[in-house]
């Protein structure tokens, strides 16, 4: 066993079996969504906002499944509510993401570099997942719209 291995606490058996020992200093945990005194960065608020958004954007689909032609006739006779829904559903997530980024950046800049890297990676992962969900949702609505047009 070399001095480097002794110093790092790694034995020959660990090296031979490929076992990797973790550092005694744990990786910092992300803290952004553990905020409780803020609007952005508060996981409870994010959960509620997500639930409200999902309910809002899936409502027309559920109403269509329940009432089909009656629902379509209502939308055709008064397209204003559907237009308002489309604007809110389309702009709500990007607006939320932009506002949250405006709160996140000043907060993360005050952290030590190692913690900052962890926070940015975690934030990016969460943001990418939300963006993928948002894109998939509108892909579903685009497909449904095409099917409705073809049905005529």
Image: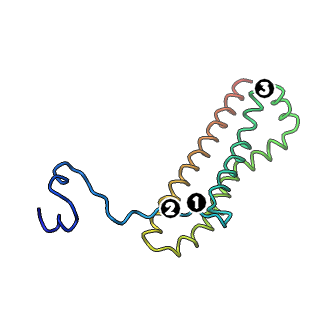
Question: Where residue 96 sits: x, y (%)?
Answer: 67, 58
- Label 1, label 2: how many angstroms apart (C-alpha)? 7 Å
Among the two numbered marks 2 and 3 on one chain, the one whose residue lies closer to the N terminus: 2
Query: Considering depth in this image, is 146 or 2 the residue closer to the camera?
Result: 2
| Quadrant into which the N terminus falls | bottom left
| Left or right of 74 on screen, residue 64 | left
- Label 2, label 3: how many angstroms apart (C-alpha)? 45 Å
The answer to whether marks 1 and 3 mark residues whose Cβ atoms lie closer than 8 Å is no
Q: Residue at x 56, y 46 (%)?
A: 132
Query: Considering depth in this image, is 115 or 59 the residue closer to the camera?
Result: 115
Q: Secondary structure at mark 3?
A: helix
Which residue corresponds to mark 3?
A: 68
Query: Considering depth in this image, is 101 or 9 the residue closer to the camera?
Result: 9
Q: Is residue 54 above or below residue 39?
A: above
Which residue corresponds to mark 2?
A: 30
Q: Residue at x 87, y 38 (%)?
A: 78
Q: Nearer the viewer, mark 1 or mark 3?
A: 1
Which labelled disc corresponds to residue 33? 1
Among the two numbered marks 1 and 3 on one chain, the one whose residue lies closer to the N terminus: 1
| Left or right of 69 on screen, residue 21 | left
Question: Where residue 66 sits: x, y (%)?
Answer: 77, 27
Q: Secondary structure at mark 1?
A: loop
Q: Is residue 143 above or below residue 27?
A: above
Q: Number of numbered discs present? A: 3
Question: Where residue 34 sits: x, y (%)?
Answer: 58, 61
């Amino acid at each position: 066993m070399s001095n480097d291995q002794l110093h790092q606490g790694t034995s020959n058996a660990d090296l031979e079996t490929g076992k990797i020992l973790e550092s005694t200093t744990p990786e910092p945990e992300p803290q952004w969504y553990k905020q409780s005194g803020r609007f952005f960065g508060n996981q409870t608020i994010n959960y509620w906002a997500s639930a409200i958004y999902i309910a809002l954007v899936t409502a027309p689909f559920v109403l269509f499944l329940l009432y089909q032609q009656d629902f379509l006739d209502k939308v055709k006779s008064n397209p204003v509510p559907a237009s308002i829904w489309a604007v809110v559903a389309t702009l709500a997530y990007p607006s939320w993401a932009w506002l949250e980024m405006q709160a996140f950046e000043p907060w993360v800049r005050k952290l030590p570099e190692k913690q900052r890297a962890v926070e940015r990676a975690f934030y990016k992962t969460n943001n990418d997942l939300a963006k993928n969900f948002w894109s998939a949702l509108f892909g579903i609505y685009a497909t449904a719209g095409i099917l409705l047009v073809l049905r005529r």
